[in-house]
Image (cartoon, helix red, strand yellow):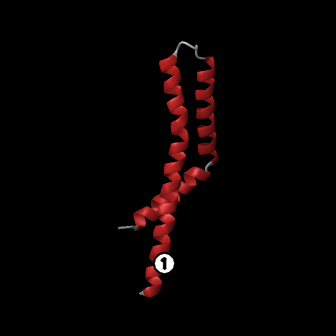
Amino acid sequence: MATDKDILESNEAELILESEVFKKAIKQLHDEYVQMWINSEPNEDGFRELIHGAVKVIPEIEKHLRIIVEKGKITRANLNRLRKVI
């Protein structure tokens, strides 16, 4: 069941996503991983695959935060509808 906790987590996730520090950290991490890949040797297949996976995970973090935000918005809307009925 949806709770006030979902709404609080949604608000926190939204603040994180909108944070300039978070945006900067994500961009720097992405750029660092890409630079590591560029500087790797062609024969470092395992390392290059690891870096590829790391780069792919970055958007997943943002995606999960957005899911938390949306879940909280839905919870908030549902609670508001229930309050109107009661």
Left or right side of 28 for 74 = left
- Which residue lies at the image location 59% right of the left edge and 39% below the top edge? 26
- Which residue lies at the image location 50% right of the left edge and 73% below the top edge? 77
Where does the image place residue 55, in percent across and percent down from the top left? Answer: 55, 33
Left or right side of 27 for 76 = left
Left or right side of 62 for 5 = left
Labels in figure, total? 1
Q: In which quadrant of the rendered image does the C terminus lie? A: bottom left
Instruction: In the displayed orientation, state which residue is furthest to the left.
Output: 1
- Which residue lies at the image location 64% right of the left edge and 40% below the top edge? 24
Q: Is residue 84 above or below residue 8?
A: below
- Residue 25, image quadrant: top right
Between 15 and 34, the residue placed more toward the observer is 34
Mark 1: secondary structure: helix
Q: In which quadrant of the rendered image does the N terminus lie? A: bottom left
Kind of residue at disc 1: Asn
Where does the image place residue 7, in percent across and percent down from the top left? Answer: 46, 64
Where does the image place residue 56, in percent across and percent down from the top left? Answer: 53, 36
Between 34 and 32, the residue placed more toward the observer is 34
Task: Check disc 1: other Cα within 10 Å, few if <14, some if 14-19, many if 20+.
Answer: few
Q: Is residue 57 above or below residue 8?
A: above
Instruction: In the displayed orientation, state which residue is furthest to the bottom.
Output: 86
Where does the image place residue 84, in percent across and percent down from the top left? Answer: 47, 85
Label 1 belongs to which residue? 80
Q: Is residue 19 above or below residue 24?
A: below
